[in-house]
Image: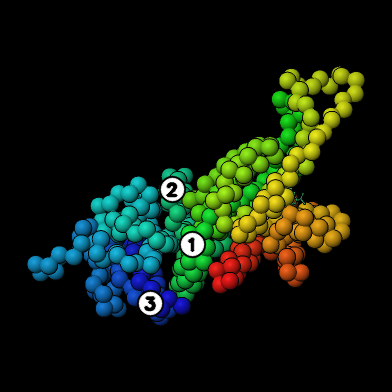
Amino acid sequence: MLQHKHVLLGAGGGPLAWLAVEVLRALQRAGARVRVVLSAETEAFVPALTFQSLTSEEVIPADQPYGLLQGTAFRPLEALVRGLDALVVVPATPALLAKLATACADEPLVRAALLHRGLTVVAFPGKAPAYQHPLVQHNLRRLREAGMVLYEQAEPALPEGEEAAWSLDPAALVQEVAACLQEASALAGKVVLVTAGPTQEPIDPVRHISNRSSGKTGFAIAELAQRRGARVVLVTGPTHLEAPPGVECVRVRTALEMREAVLAHAPAAHVVIKTAAVADFRPKAVATHKVKKDEAAVVIELERNPDILAELGAQKGERILVGFAAETQDLLRHAQEKLQKKHLDFIVANDVTDPTLGFASDFNRVRILHASGQVEELPTMSKKQLAACILDRVQALLAQKARS
Ligand code: PMT
């Protein structure tokens, strides 16, 4: 699974420090070449000799932040982390998280994290009470924003005050490292433009026409595409979701604003995925002041918004175009029409009559209609899983284009 991969294992401290030894063994079993760097807290719990006896690479002690001094020879840390595929930190104590989040590089583990540009996975017992403190949560957010993968094994919630017995499965962590490394190469270097959320079309200063899109689907796709190595631009209508780390997020309100942002970023994009539920119509005139409820009868005259995806389809070029279709009847027929009319590579069709799926839900059940005529029916799945299915198909198309 990890043959020919070079991994630096950052061994944390605390009562769970022994888990780093198990992860070292699991990484080695998966075929990785592993070097260990100790944290300032490790040796109080696990001696360096334990790690050294398990690896032929030199263990980097915590008191040598700039490199290894061996006799008169000095090997700088830069040389020791060069060519590294992944840094895996386990278990990250709150103290270590704080050092990483603030770039407090007084020990080699933190300096290595600052020097390493590739995948960094940080594993910690997230359900333990100390990790719930807002300060620790703040540090975790900063690490996520810096693009690190936070690995928190799912644990059942514990009664208040009860200490978590963290049962990290080293094999599952290694699998996550392998998956992230694989993901990183597939879309590497590609620019992916994703749209998300609803648009709002103002009626007056306090009212608008909109829909129930939450943005969850587009945000999940943007986050995963970024993790798979793409440069991602996310153009989103109004939503409460936080921008995924490392993603360029452009926030817009109306369909016209979305059109402008999409057309500005489309020329550089290799892939466009349009999950946004764009309002088809907007009020022809926007009242300057709040429309009074005692006005006799209010008729709002609407005019058509431009179809952004159809515009992109008309100038498709080599770009991969993915559309969505939200339908309440004749799903396949309407989706098929949109697929052809907008010159899409594939369209993700969802029947939005089930209130537990689609709009605003964490789950969806879709069919994927391909330009080739193939129709796939996918089971009910989370929007994160759906994001993976969509990107897998995009990657297959990119690979096909590269071959032809
Ligand atoms: O945001 P969530 O809560 O996660 O919900 C996800 C979703 C239900 C919004 C999503 O799965 C979905 O179906 N999105 C498309 C909704 C939609 O507006 O479909 P449509 O059939 O009206 O549009 C077809 C395609 O054309 C879409 O890709 C849309 O982005 C695009 N379009 C539509 C109108 C317009 N003026 N410009 C466009 O680009």
Residue at 70% in and 59% down: 344
Q: Tell me residue 17's x, y (percent).
A: 35, 66
Circle 2 residue: 142
Query: Secondary structure under badge 3?
Result: loop
Instruction: Compare residues 346 and 87 and report the one nearer the observer.
Output: 346
| Left or right position of 301 against 368 | right
> In this orientation, which residue lies closer to the viewer: 164 or 272?
272
Query: Which residue matches tag 3?
Result: 4
| Amino acid at pointer 3 | His
Upstream in sequence: badge 3 or badge 1: 3
Of mark 3 and mark 2, the one earlier in the sequence is: 3
From this viewpoint, which residue is outermost toward the right? 296
Neighbor class of circle 2 (other Cα within 10 Å; few <14, some 14-19, many 20+) is some
**Looking at the image, residue 202 lies above or below residue 110:** above
Query: Mark 1: few, some, or many residues within 10 Å (few <14, many ≥20)?
Result: some
Identify residue type, mark 1: Ala
Colour basis: rainbow
Q: Say what amino acid the circle numbered 2 marks.
A: Arg
Q: Where residue 40 appears, x then y in whole percent?
A: 27, 58
Residue lying at 43% horizontally and 48% vertically, measured from the top left: 142
Badge nearest the viewer, 3 or 1: 1
**x 82%, y 33%: residue:** 302
Residue assigned mark 1:
188
> Can the viewer see residue 92?
yes
User: Residue visible at 41% across and 78% down?
Assistant: 3
Q: Report the mark closest to the observer, 3 or 2.
A: 3
